[in-house]
Image (cartoon, grey):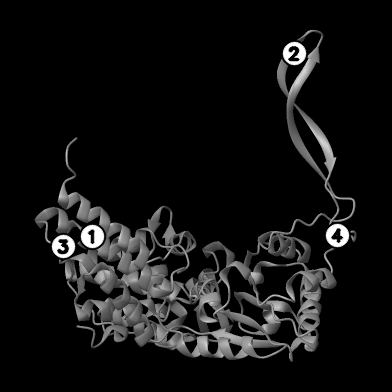
Amino acid sequence: MDSIDPKRAAYINFLAKCDQAYRPFSPIDLPEFFAGRIEHIRRLEAEIGAPGRHVALYGERGVGKTSLAKLAYFFLRRNEEQTHFVRCEKSSTFDTIFRDALASAGVEVMLNGLESEGERHGTLGLGPIGIRGTRRVHRTFRRIVADQQITNRVLLDQFAPSDGLIIVDEYDRVTDAATHTRMAELLKHFSDAASTTKIMLVGVADTLSQLIGEHESISRSVAQIKLDRMSSEELGEVVSKGVQHLEATIKSGIATRIVRLADGFPYFVHLICRHAARVAANQILESGNTGVVISEDEYAEGLGGALSNAEHSLRESYAQATITTRRPSEKFMLVLWSVALSDERDVQVKDMAKNMAFFTGTGTEPKPGSFNWNLGELSGDNRGNILAKVREGYYKFTNPLMRPYIRSVMELENIVYHGKQWEFPFMKGAQ
């Protein structure tokens, strides 16, 4: 049997470690790869440790809510086997959410009168000769709960005595108003009963009422923890932890550029670092040297790969907004770039004009009237509502992840086609 090429083996090992360290497509699930959020973890510990206190963890998309929720059991020193993680869908209801939680705890719940249609394999008798076939049969499952719905009492009886954790992720997707009401009642019920099993609701929202609706009765029992965008220091820790795991080196200027592009979102740090590191892995195949270095070339090629593999909704939305008759429209693109260039999230039209002059290099600012129509289109259905009108004369990206995505597009364009002639304000000092 031929021995494995050591270069190839080292290369494959490096890629495997890369997939552990940088995970843009799935939450972090190992504590050693989790970075930052020290203050949020301390707050979580304090709130969950308080009798009768539960937690709502919310914030923008892409800030790492699910990663923190997935590792909450570790930070809170709770038994992983008594931690029950449920992910919601648009069709989720109170009963489906807690049927999943109970199933995670090893309890099968069948509501009163519920039947399930299953398949049973058997022999269909045709005289002395049988043929193998399938027939559909109805069977009624044994009733563990005799009510039409899962009650608070059932959940308390099952969970209250244990030192557990029920995490309900992507709760913002739930649209059923009755579920929000029942969830609020359950939280108050668990709080009043001093349940040692705590509930964490996790979702995209700006406020608790956005996540669960207006229920004043739960303000005492639910701590509100908003997960903001990560600081530059925290994002730098994401980069460095991954590089250390890879036993690689990244030039400090490159690490800074990645952090600046990410705009506070760990998703983009993981995405760009993953692709840059995978490009750098070719050094192992070429020279056999495992001392991999991520420098300018790996960064540029990795950035292109990151954009090609970014979240589909971002790529699709940008294409819908900028492409006219199968070709990119320079005017629509210029408007979006001018919004992305601004330090402000709510961008004034006069600042867009100033930023357009930055890109055209003419020094002449266009009159706002010359691109008002474009703004109207970009904030309408035809262009996918990529912009939202905040108030008169001010616009912002509807999806906050769009700004770092477009900034990354601008950076790649600057490297590949413009010889780095542009010095973006958000990149100053990143050498």
Closer-to-camera residue (160/248):
160
User: In this rendering, which labeled residue sits more in front, label 2 or label 3?
Assistant: 2
**Mark 4 surroundings: few (<14), some (14-19) or many (≥20) residues within 10 A:** some
Residue under label 2:
130
Disc 4 from disc 3: Cα separation: 59 Å
Measured from the top left, where is residue 310 in percent x and y?
40, 62
User: In this rendering, which labeled residue sits more in front, label 4 or label 1?
Assistant: 4
Q: Quadrant of the C terminus?
A: bottom left
Of label 4 and label 3, which has the lower sequence position? 4
Disc 1 from disc 3: Cα separation: 13 Å
Asked if disc 1 and disc 3 are in contact, CB closer than 8 Å, the reply is no
Task: Specify the farthest residue to the left.
Answer: 287
**Mark 3 surroundings: few (<14), some (14-19) or many (≥20) residues within 10 A:** some
Asked if disc 4 and disc 3 are in contact, CB closer than 8 Å, the reply is no
* Residue 279, disc: 1
Amino acid type at circle 2 is: Gly
Asked if disc 2 and disc 4 are in contact, CB closer than 8 Å, the reply is no
Residue under label 4:
145
Of label 1 and label 3, which has the lower sequence position? 1
User: In this rendering, which labeled residue sits more in front, label 4 or label 3?
Assistant: 4
Asked if disc 2 and disc 1 are in contact, CB closer than 8 Å, the reply is no
Q: Is residue 16 left or right of residue 103?
A: left
Element class at badge 2 = strand
